[in-house]
Structure formats: C-alpha cells, structure tokens
Image (tube, rainbow, N blue to C red):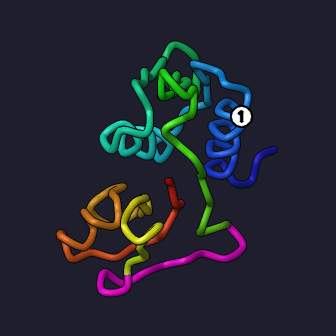
Amino acid sequence: MNTDPIADYLTRLRNAIKANHRIVEIPASKIKKEITRVLHEKGYIQSYRFDDSSVQGTIKIALKYNPSTKQSAIVNLERVSKPGLRKYSHFENLPRVLNGLGIAILSTSKGVVTEKEAKSLNVGGEVLCYVY
C-alpha cells in the first residue's frame, strides 16, 4: 500500500533518470497527470501519453536528455508537502527555486500550476514539489 502517490511518482522519475531510461511508466491519477502536463509545458520531459486501457490507467513519460552530454533535463526532484506535514504558501510568499532557475509546482484552486503562474493568478496553495 502506497500512502504518498506523488512521492512514488517523483521517485519513479528519479530512478529512471539515474538508470538512463528513455521511457518510464507510472500508474495514473488526476494529480499525476497534471504534474506531468506542467513538466512537459516547462520543458523538463520530452513527451507523455496517458493510457486508460486498464482500470487505473498509466502515464508513459519520455524523458529528455542532452544529446552531447547524456545529462537529463531534470537534475533534481524534491517533494515538499508530505502527508504528515502539508506545506501551504500564500501568493505573496511563494518559494523561488534556485533563484528562479527551477520551478515549484503548486496545487491551487485554479489547478496545478508553477509558482510564477500562481503569482500572476494571485492564488496560493499547497507546494507539491521543486524541480530543477
């Protein structure tokens, strides 16, 4: 039994990157689909596909690597808000990741967005993870 599906999602991505896999398959949920969409929009992953053939469905993610150095576009994934200790942030106090070089992914009333989008929408929310 998995108590934190988002941490499991990030760990599967982290492990696939360390093993230099091109594609990783992850069990789907609505929040994972939205996090995947944000990662694709910001250029951290190459592409993704939702497969709803089974009951739960899966997400297939094609990871993005630099062709010359073979280094992943994602250097680090860090879970911030956990089931035991939720982290919320007001739109005036949104976190900056690596002084603006990375992104913080938030779950807000307007959906799953980055900290920059949340600031422009004037909404705060739960800080899910940092990506850089």
Q: Is residue 117 left or right of residue 2?
A: left
Q: Secondary structure at mark 1?
A: helix
Q: Is residue 87 magenta?
A: yes
Q: Is residue 118 magenta?
A: no
Q: Is residue 74 above or below residue 77?
A: above
Q: Is residue 73 above or below residue 94?
A: above
Residue segment shown in magenta: 83-93
Taking depth in this image into account, of 92 and 66 the one nearest to the observer is 66
Taking depth in this image into account, of 114 and 108 the one nearest to the observer is 114
Q: Would you call the spot at circle 1 few (<14 residues within 10 Å), some (14-19), or many (20 or more)?
A: few
Query: Residue 76: x percent and y percent?
Result: 60, 51
Q: Is residue 34 above or below residue 104?
A: above
Query: Residue 89: x percent and y percent?
Result: 43, 81
Taking depth in this image into account, of 56 and 37 the one nearest to the observer is 37
Query: Residue 51: x percent and y percent?
Result: 48, 18
Residue at 27% in and 75% down: 123
In this figure, what is the number of numbered marks?
1
Query: Residue 100: x percent and y percent?
Result: 36, 66
In the rendered image, the quadrant that contains the N terminus is top right
Q: Is residue 116 above or below residue 17?
A: below
Q: Quadrant of residue 109?
A: bottom left
Q: Which residue is mark 1?
A: 18
Q: Quadrant of residue 57?
A: top right
Taking depth in this image into account, of 56 and 132 the one nearest to the observer is 132
In the displayed image of the protein, which residue is found farthest to the top? Answer: 53
Residue at 26% in and 62% down: 110
Q: Is residue 48 left or right of residue 81?
A: left
In the displayed image of the protein, which residue is found farthest to the front? Answer: 68
Q: Is residue 109 left or right of residue 63?
A: left
Residue at 71% in and 34% down: 18
